[in-house]
Amino acid sequence: METSDRLLVIDDEQGIREGCRRVLEPEGYRVETAGNLAEARERLAAETFGLVLLDVMLPDGRGIELLEEIRRRDADTVVAIITGYATVELAVEAIQQGAYDFLSKPFNGDVLLLAVRQGLERRRLAIDARRVHEVERQSAELGRAREELERLDRFKSDFMLTVAHELRSPVSAAQSLLRTLLHGLAGDLNDRQRDMLRRMEARNAELLELVNDLLSLAASKTYEPDRPLAEVPLSEVLKPVVARACEEAQAKGVEFTYRGEENAGVVRGTAEGLAMIFGNLIGNAVKYTPAGGRVEVEAGGDSRTTRVRVVDTGIGIPAEDLERLGEEFFRAGNAKASAIVGSGLGLSIVRHNLSRFGGEMDIQSQVGRGTTVTVSLPQAGPAPS
């Protein structure tokens, strides 16, 4: 039974107590009674009541003494004073101390029911108002927390952008010098020197890839959101991405196919953001597919949605890691265990840009058998013929 349905009648007249019970119980209320302060305190200690009908004068003291105790036990309990004509002043005093209303003896059943219903409605409204206030307070706190997180995220993005920009020039310069040495343009090298330079060049390339990924991620959070969306023919974005991936696949001995360029459609976005999306997805497919494997890229869709599907026969992704893909710097366990270098930022960049363009991504994968990534983007132009 709800607390609001439990009532306590405190009055020294048995007729009043039993009369209240006879009127209220048929209406679905559970009624407890007490004839003095001591009994009232026992009832109040045993359970919580939605409404208390309280006589002003009791054999062992003034009923008003219970007001503070009732409020301390449950601030939402409504108290209605029962009083005789000679004690109206005491009833007014009780209302000043927190009682809701008073009933003058004698009163009939209709008056009693009206007072109880109005009192319990007041209780309900007070509880609802407090809940609304609490929701508003929590909402305000969440708003402040969100603003702080956004501020910290902007600070992190600005920091990444600054650091990456500062690192890119010296890292690129070092890479250029290492390649100059490896090509023998600065003099002949013995085998040991050449091997050491190759290892240095490979490590430097990893660092340069990380710097470039940091720049892309920072751009997707800072520059990209400020760029207006436009209608972009997806084939214009896919052509250079696919050409680059095809060269990398051939160098690894991976079969690469691309179908559906004429059905790529027109989507709303930015060329740079779309290039980040598909550069990362297609690049990952080639990167994580060993020699002898296969990568397929297919574009298509209908009048409402353009879909690009990237299928590979690479190392796959463990099921337990699928939900975390897209977290910054997260890499699947088997990817980290392999000799393949990665920053764990690629899918973060993809998700940031997809969110802005209203796109979705579905990833299906099996370890050792490969991965299928399907990107869906709303069509912005007429359906392809």
Image (spheres, grey):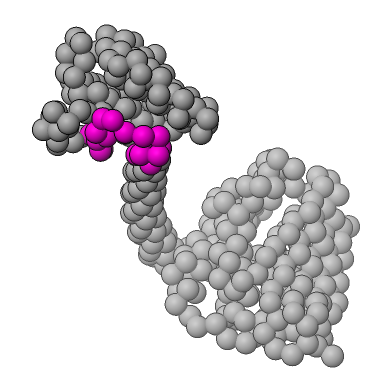
Is residue 274 visible from the viewing direction of this image?
yes
Q: Judge by depth and name the residue closer to the eye, 385 or 253.
A: 385
Residue for point 59% across, 79% down: 269
Residue at 25 percent of width and 38 percent of height: 101
Residue 2 located left or right of residue 151: right
- Point out residue 308 in the picture as x, y percentages from the top left corner: 76, 71
- Vertical comparison of 289 with 224: above or below: above
Residue 105: percent from left, percent from top: 26, 30
Q: Is residue 165 above or below residue 384?
A: above
Name the residue: 44% across, 23% down. Answer: 21
Residue 267 magenta: no
For residue 277, side relative to residue 28 (left or right): right
- The foreground one among 209 and 272 is 272
In the rendered image, which quarter contains the C terminus?
bottom right
Pick the front one: 266 or 174: 266
Left or right of 306 in this view: 341: left
Choose top left, top right, bottom left or bottom right for residue 67. top left
Q: Give the range drawn in magenta.
A: 99-115
> Residue 104: within the magenta?
yes
Residue 60's place in the image compared with 201, above or below, is above
Horizontal side of 186 relative to 103 (left or right) equals right
Residue 76 in the image: state x and y as whole percent: 33, 34
Across the whole image, how many numbered discs are drawn on residues? 0
Q: Position of residue 210 (x, y in %)?
A: 54, 58
Name the residue located 24 percent from the left edge and 33 percent from the top edge.
Answer: 104
